[in-house]
């Protein structure tokens, strides 16, 4: 049985480059990288944690045999469901060294990744006869049960007229699933997400 040993490599040929990540519409984390130039580096170990360890590399090496292994000849990326709780994803390149697996840093770490709540919006505009106003009926549905509570803090509606932004307004606590607005016929309603919540909420 092979053992895992931590090594150090100042040689640039061992460096992993272009380490990046993103979250897809299905709440999968997609992590990509460019393998080191050195051909012996044929493995990438991957792990996840809901918290950031004080010493990530030491934490990573406590049980390296339990981590997922990506092989160089099969992939240049790693895809996994984020899950209900936000997580960091950790990566360390490795190569075979006689009967051992040599693992080396620096450890590659993503930001804390969140599974996004998807908000589906529907807007119906109904002009009011003999009036400069129209009735706007909107409905909101959420992919997760806690979406309504989250949208109370994160979701806003904006008014636009002749391609000009008029204002941004919060949703009333009583209309988290839908409601009615009366606005001018020349105006339009759009929903937006506060920037600080863009990593946990997505409009569809």
Image: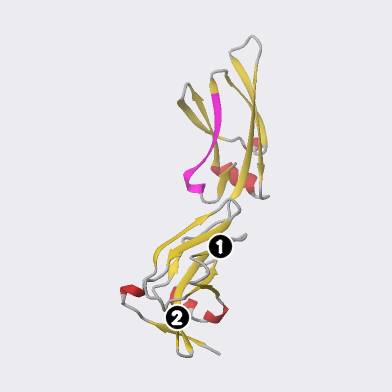
- Element under label 1? strand
Residue 178, picture quadrant? top right
Which sits in the foreground, 169 or 113? Answer: 113
Q: Which residue is mark 1?
A: 79
Residue 181, picture quadrant? top right
Q: Is residue 28 above or below residue 42?
A: above
Residue 129's tag is none
Residue 52 image point, x, y percent: 48, 68
Which residue is outermost to the left? Answer: 11
Q: Residue at 52% of width from left, 80% of height from top?
A: 64
- Badge 1 density bin: few <14, some 14–19, many ≥20, Cα 10 Å: some
Quadrant for the N terminus, please. Answer: bottom right
Q: Residue at 66% of width from left, 11% of height from top?
A: 129
Q: Which residue is mark 2?
A: 95
Left or right: 120 in relation to 192:
right
Q: Residue at 59% of width from left, 47% of height from top?
A: 150
Q: Is residue 67 above or below residue 20?
A: below
Q: Is residue 196 magenta?
A: yes
The magenta segment: 188-198
Residue 71 image point, x, y percent: 51, 73
Left or right: 47 in relation to 93:
right
Q: Residue at 54% of width from left, 43% of height from top?
A: 154
Residue 155 image point, x, y percent: 56, 40
């Amino acid at each position: 049985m092979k053992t895992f040993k931590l090594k150090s490599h100042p040689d640039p040929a061992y460096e992993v480059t272009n380490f990046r990540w993103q979250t897809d519409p299905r709440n999968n984390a997609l992590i990509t990288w460019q393998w080191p130039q050195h051909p012996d580096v044929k493995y990438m170990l991957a792990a996840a944690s809901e918290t950031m360890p004080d010493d990530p590399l030491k934490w990573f090496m406590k049980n390296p045999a339990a981590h997922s292994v990506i092989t160089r000849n099969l992939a240049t990326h790693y895809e996994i469901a984020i899950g209900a709780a936000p997580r960091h994803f950790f990566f360390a390149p490795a190569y075979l060294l006689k009967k051992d697996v040599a693992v080396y840093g620096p450890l590659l770490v993503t930001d804390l990744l969140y599974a996004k709540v998807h908000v589906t919006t529907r807007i119906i505009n109904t002009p009011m006869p003999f009036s400069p106003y129209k009735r706007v009926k909107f409905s909101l549905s959420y992919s997760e049960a806690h979406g309504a509570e989250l949208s109370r803090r994160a979701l806003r509606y904006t008014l636009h007229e002749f391609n000009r932004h008029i204002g941004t307004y919060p949703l009333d606590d009583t209309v988290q699933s839908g409601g009615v607005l009366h606005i001018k016929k020349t105006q339009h309603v759009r929903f937006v997400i506060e920037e600080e919540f863009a990593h946990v909420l997505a409009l569809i």
